[in-house]
Image (cartoon, grey):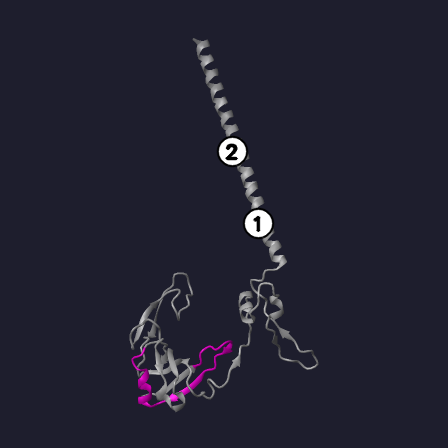
Protein backbone atom coordinates (compact mmCIF):
# COMPACT_ATOMS: atom_id res chain seq x y z
CA UNK A 1 0.00 0.00 0.00
CA UNK A 2 1.41 3.37 -1.04
CA UNK A 3 1.59 6.28 1.37
CA UNK A 4 -1.51 8.41 0.89
CA UNK A 5 -1.51 12.20 0.91
CA UNK A 6 -4.83 13.70 1.93
CA UNK A 7 -5.30 17.35 1.01
CA UNK A 8 -8.01 18.76 3.26
CA UNK A 9 -9.61 22.17 2.69
CA UNK A 10 -11.85 24.00 5.15
CA UNK A 11 -15.27 25.09 4.01
CA UNK A 12 -15.67 28.69 2.85
CA UNK A 13 -16.54 30.65 5.98
CA UNK A 14 -17.38 34.23 5.14
CA UNK A 15 -14.65 35.77 3.01
CA UNK A 16 -11.65 33.78 4.22
CA UNK A 17 -9.33 32.07 1.76
CA UNK A 18 -8.88 28.31 1.67
CA UNK A 19 -5.89 26.95 3.60
CA UNK A 20 -4.97 23.39 2.51
CA UNK A 21 -3.59 20.84 4.94
CA UNK A 22 -1.59 17.83 3.75
CA UNK A 23 -1.73 14.61 5.80
CA UNK A 24 0.23 11.46 4.96
CA UNK A 25 -1.44 8.21 6.04
CA UNK A 26 -0.30 4.61 5.46
CA UNK A 27 -2.70 2.85 7.81
CA UNK A 28 -5.09 0.63 5.85
CA UNK A 29 -7.76 0.69 8.57
CA UNK A 30 -7.96 4.47 8.52
CA UNK A 31 -8.04 4.66 4.73
CA UNK A 32 -10.75 2.00 4.50
CA UNK A 33 -13.44 4.53 5.50
CA UNK A 34 -12.97 6.23 2.10
CA UNK A 35 -12.92 3.08 -0.04
CA UNK A 36 -15.83 2.53 -2.47
CA UNK A 37 -17.00 6.09 -1.87
CA UNK A 38 -17.66 8.44 -4.77
CA UNK A 39 -16.81 12.07 -5.40
CA UNK A 40 -19.19 14.44 -3.53
CA UNK A 41 -20.02 11.82 -0.86
CA UNK A 42 -19.58 12.81 2.78
CA UNK A 43 -17.57 10.72 5.27
CA UNK A 44 -17.31 11.01 9.06
CA UNK A 45 -13.66 11.66 10.00
CA UNK A 46 -13.72 10.19 13.54
CA UNK A 47 -11.26 7.42 12.63
CA UNK A 48 -8.55 9.91 11.66
CA UNK A 49 -7.90 10.70 15.33
CA UNK A 50 -9.39 12.14 18.49
CA UNK A 51 -8.97 15.70 17.25
CA UNK A 52 -11.15 14.86 14.20
CA UNK A 53 -14.15 13.88 16.32
CA UNK A 54 -17.33 15.41 14.93
CA UNK A 55 -15.78 16.43 11.62
CA UNK A 56 -17.47 15.51 8.32
CA UNK A 57 -15.38 15.50 5.14
CA UNK A 58 -16.59 15.57 1.55
CA UNK A 59 -14.58 13.88 -1.23
CA UNK A 60 -13.80 16.40 -3.97
CA UNK A 61 -11.28 14.49 -6.13
CA UNK A 62 -7.91 12.82 -6.21
CA UNK A 63 -5.03 11.46 -8.28
CA UNK A 64 -3.71 7.96 -8.80
CA UNK A 65 -0.09 6.80 -8.54
CA UNK A 66 0.66 7.90 -12.12
CA UNK A 67 -0.91 11.36 -11.69
CA UNK A 68 -4.20 10.83 -13.53
CA UNK A 69 -7.02 12.74 -11.83
CA UNK A 70 -10.46 11.49 -10.91
CA UNK A 71 -13.47 12.62 -12.92
CA UNK A 72 -17.00 13.00 -11.64
CA UNK A 73 -19.60 10.88 -13.43
CA UNK A 74 -17.24 8.06 -14.49
CA UNK A 75 -18.63 5.25 -12.31
CA UNK A 76 -15.58 3.03 -11.99
CA UNK A 77 -12.45 2.74 -9.88
CA UNK A 78 -10.31 1.93 -12.93
CA UNK A 79 -8.54 4.12 -15.42
CA UNK A 80 -10.41 4.56 -18.70
CA UNK A 81 -9.81 6.42 -21.96
CA UNK A 82 -12.56 8.84 -22.89
CA UNK A 83 -13.11 10.94 -26.00
CA UNK A 84 -13.09 14.56 -24.85
CA UNK A 85 -14.65 17.46 -26.71
CA UNK A 86 -15.18 21.16 -26.09
CA UNK A 87 -16.91 21.91 -22.77
CA UNK A 88 -15.83 18.78 -20.92
CA UNK A 89 -13.78 19.21 -17.71
CA UNK A 90 -10.05 18.64 -17.93
CA UNK A 91 -9.81 19.41 -21.66
CA UNK A 92 -9.13 22.62 -23.60
CA UNK A 93 -9.91 22.64 -27.29
CA UNK A 94 -7.02 23.82 -29.48
CA UNK A 95 -8.81 23.77 -32.85
CA UNK A 96 -12.43 24.11 -33.89
CA UNK A 97 -14.21 20.77 -33.74
CA UNK A 98 -11.20 18.98 -32.26
CA UNK A 99 -11.72 15.93 -30.06
CA UNK A 100 -9.08 14.04 -28.12
CA UNK A 101 -8.95 10.71 -26.30
CA UNK A 102 -7.43 11.02 -22.82
CA UNK A 103 -6.88 8.74 -19.86
CA UNK A 104 -8.93 9.51 -16.78
CA UNK A 105 -9.64 7.77 -13.47
CA UNK A 106 -13.17 7.05 -12.32
CA UNK A 107 -14.88 8.81 -9.42
CA UNK A 108 -14.83 5.82 -7.03
CA UNK A 109 -12.06 5.75 -4.39
CA UNK A 110 -9.86 2.66 -4.09
CA UNK A 111 -6.40 1.72 -2.81
CA UNK A 112 -4.53 2.81 -5.95
CA UNK A 113 -4.86 6.52 -5.29
CA UNK A 114 -1.88 8.57 -4.15
CA UNK A 115 -3.72 11.82 -3.32
CA UNK A 116 -7.27 12.25 -2.05
CA UNK A 117 -8.81 15.72 -1.92
CA UNK A 118 -11.28 16.41 0.89
CA UNK A 119 -13.29 19.43 2.03
CA UNK A 120 -14.50 20.09 5.57
CA UNK A 121 -18.30 20.16 5.51
CA UNK A 122 -18.95 20.13 9.27
CA UNK A 123 -16.57 21.32 11.95
CA UNK A 124 -16.06 19.22 15.06
CA UNK A 125 -15.40 20.03 18.68
CA UNK A 126 -11.69 20.85 18.42
CA UNK A 127 -9.69 23.00 16.02
CA UNK A 128 -7.21 21.29 13.70
CA UNK A 129 -3.81 23.06 13.80
CA UNK A 130 -3.07 24.64 10.45
CA UNK A 131 -6.57 24.03 9.10
CA UNK A 132 -9.37 25.55 11.16
CA UNK A 133 -7.47 27.49 13.84
CA UNK A 134 -6.41 30.27 11.46
CA UNK A 135 -8.26 32.28 8.83
CA UNK A 136 -6.45 34.00 6.01
CA UNK A 137 -8.26 37.09 4.69
CA UNK A 138 -9.04 37.36 1.02
CA UNK A 139 -6.46 39.25 -0.98
CA UNK A 140 -9.04 40.95 -3.22
CA UNK A 141 -12.41 42.42 -2.37
CA UNK A 142 -15.60 42.26 -4.44
CA UNK A 143 -15.65 44.08 -7.74
CA UNK A 144 -19.29 44.05 -8.84
CA UNK A 145 -21.74 46.65 -7.52
CA UNK A 146 -24.28 44.10 -6.29
CA UNK A 147 -21.66 42.10 -4.40
CA UNK A 148 -20.23 45.24 -2.74
CA UNK A 149 -23.73 46.23 -1.62
CA UNK A 150 -24.33 42.73 -0.30
CA UNK A 151 -21.04 42.65 1.61
CA UNK A 152 -21.55 46.03 3.36
CA UNK A 153 -25.37 45.82 3.51
CA UNK A 154 -25.82 49.02 1.50
CA UNK A 155 -28.95 50.50 -0.03
CA UNK A 156 -29.25 51.90 -3.54
CA UNK A 157 -28.92 55.44 -2.18
CA UNK A 158 -25.43 54.77 -0.74
CA UNK A 159 -22.35 55.58 -2.79
CA UNK A 160 -20.69 52.25 -3.59
CA UNK A 161 -17.42 53.95 -4.57
CA UNK A 162 -16.73 54.81 -0.93
CA UNK A 163 -16.76 51.12 0.09
CA UNK A 164 -14.32 49.60 -2.40
CA UNK A 165 -11.67 47.41 -0.76
CA UNK A 166 -8.22 48.97 -1.35
CA UNK A 167 -5.28 46.58 -1.51
CA UNK A 168 -1.97 47.95 -0.18
CA UNK A 169 0.96 47.70 -2.58
CA UNK A 170 4.49 46.76 -1.50
CA UNK A 171 6.20 49.80 -0.04
CA UNK A 172 9.30 51.27 -1.68
CA UNK A 173 12.00 53.20 0.07
CA UNK A 174 11.53 56.93 -0.04
CA UNK A 175 8.03 56.75 -1.52
CA UNK A 176 4.57 57.09 -0.06
CA UNK A 177 2.53 53.95 0.62
CA UNK A 178 0.14 53.23 -2.24
CA UNK A 179 -3.04 51.21 -2.57
CA UNK A 180 -4.83 49.68 -5.50
CA UNK A 181 -8.60 49.35 -5.97
CA UNK A 182 -10.53 47.44 -8.65
CA UNK A 183 -12.66 49.13 -11.28
CA UNK A 184 -16.28 48.77 -10.20
CA UNK A 185 -18.33 46.77 -12.66
CA UNK A 186 -22.01 47.48 -13.52
CA UNK A 187 -21.85 50.88 -11.85
CA UNK A 188 -24.73 53.14 -12.93
CA UNK A 189 -23.37 56.70 -13.20
CA UNK A 190 -24.74 59.87 -14.86
CA UNK A 191 -22.30 59.30 -17.72
CA UNK A 192 -23.64 55.77 -18.19
CA UNK A 193 -27.24 57.02 -18.19
CA UNK A 194 -26.35 59.74 -20.69
CA UNK A 195 -24.65 57.21 -22.95
CA UNK A 196 -27.67 54.94 -22.69
CA UNK A 197 -30.00 57.79 -23.66
CA UNK A 198 -27.71 58.65 -26.57
CA UNK A 199 -27.70 55.05 -27.80
CA UNK A 200 -31.50 54.85 -27.59
CA UNK A 201 -31.85 58.18 -29.40
CA UNK A 202 -29.46 57.01 -32.12
CA UNK A 203 -31.46 53.80 -32.56
CA UNK A 204 -34.67 55.82 -32.80
CA UNK A 205 -33.15 58.18 -35.37
CA UNK A 206 -31.87 55.21 -37.36
CA UNK A 207 -35.31 53.58 -37.32
CA UNK A 208 -37.00 56.81 -38.46
CA UNK A 209 -34.41 57.25 -41.20
CA UNK A 210 -34.92 53.69 -42.45
CA UNK A 211 -38.69 54.17 -42.39
CA UNK A 212 -38.41 57.44 -44.32
CA UNK A 213 -36.02 55.95 -46.89
CA UNK A 214 -38.29 52.92 -47.29
CA UNK A 215 -41.27 55.22 -47.97
CA UNK A 216 -39.25 57.23 -50.49
CA UNK A 217 -38.09 54.04 -52.20
CA UNK A 218 -41.65 52.69 -52.39
CA UNK A 219 -42.83 56.01 -53.86
CA UNK A 220 -40.00 55.98 -56.41
CA UNK A 221 -40.75 52.36 -57.28
CA UNK A 222 -44.43 53.07 -57.96
CA UNK A 223 -43.45 56.09 -60.08
CA UNK A 224 -41.01 53.99 -62.17
CA UNK A 225 -43.62 51.26 -62.63
CA UNK A 226 -46.17 53.88 -63.74
CA UNK A 227 -43.68 55.34 -66.23
CA UNK A 228 -42.89 51.84 -67.48
CA UNK A 229 -46.58 51.10 -68.06
CA UNK A 230 -47.09 54.41 -69.86
CA UNK A 231 -44.09 53.75 -72.12
CA UNK A 232 -45.40 50.28 -72.92
CA UNK A 233 -48.85 51.69 -73.78
CA UNK A 234 -47.35 54.40 -75.99
CA UNK A 235 -45.28 51.80 -77.90
CA UNK A 236 -48.36 49.65 -78.45
CA UNK A 237 -50.36 52.67 -79.71
CA UNK A 238 -47.60 53.74 -82.07
CA UNK A 239 -47.26 50.19 -83.47
CA UNK A 240 -51.04 49.96 -83.93
CA UNK A 241 -51.10 53.28 -85.82
CA UNK A 242 -48.25 52.23 -88.09
CA UNK A 243 -49.98 48.93 -88.90
CA UNK A 244 -53.31 50.64 -89.76
CA UNK A 245 -51.62 53.31 -91.95
CA UNK A 246 -49.71 50.66 -93.92
CA UNK A 247 -52.94 48.74 -94.53
Residue occupying image coordinates x 57% and y 68%:
154
**Region rendered in magenta:** 9-37
Mark 2 packing: few (<14 Cα in 10 Å), some, or many (20+)?
A: few
Quadrant in the picture for residue 148: bottom right
* Magenta-colored stretch includes residue 216: no
Q: Which x, y percent locates residue 245?
A: 46, 9
* Magenta-colored stretch includes residue 21: yes
**Total labels drawn:** 2
Q: Quadrant of the C terminus?
A: top left
The answer to whether 90 is drawn above or below residue 66 in the figure is above
Q: Which mark is residue 85?
A: none
User: Which residue was labeled with disc 2?
Assistant: 218
User: Which residue was labeled with disc 1?
Assistant: 200
Q: Earlier in the sequence, mark 1 or mark 2?
A: 1
Q: Secondary structure at mark 1?
A: helix
Q: Which x, y percent locates residue 24?
A: 39, 88
Q: Is residue 65 visible?
A: no
Q: How far is the residue under mark 1 from the one under mark 2?
A: 27 Å
The answer to whether 52 is drawn above or below residue 164 in the figure is below
Residue occupying image coordinates x 47% and y 20%:
233
Residue nearer the viewer, 174 or 7: 7
The answer to whether 243 is drawn above or below residue 105 in the figure is above
Q: Which x, y percent locates residue 18?
A: 48, 79
Q: Are marks 1 and 2 in contact (CB under 8 Å)?
A: no
Residue nearer the viewer, 159 or 198: 159
Amino acid sequence: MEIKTMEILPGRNGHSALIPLLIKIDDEKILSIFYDKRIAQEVAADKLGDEWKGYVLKISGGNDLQGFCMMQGVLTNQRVRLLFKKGMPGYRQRRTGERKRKSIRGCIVDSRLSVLDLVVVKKGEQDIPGLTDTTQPRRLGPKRVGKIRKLFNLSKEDDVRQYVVHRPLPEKEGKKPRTKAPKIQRLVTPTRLQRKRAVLAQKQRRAEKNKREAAEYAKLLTQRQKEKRQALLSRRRSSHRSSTSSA
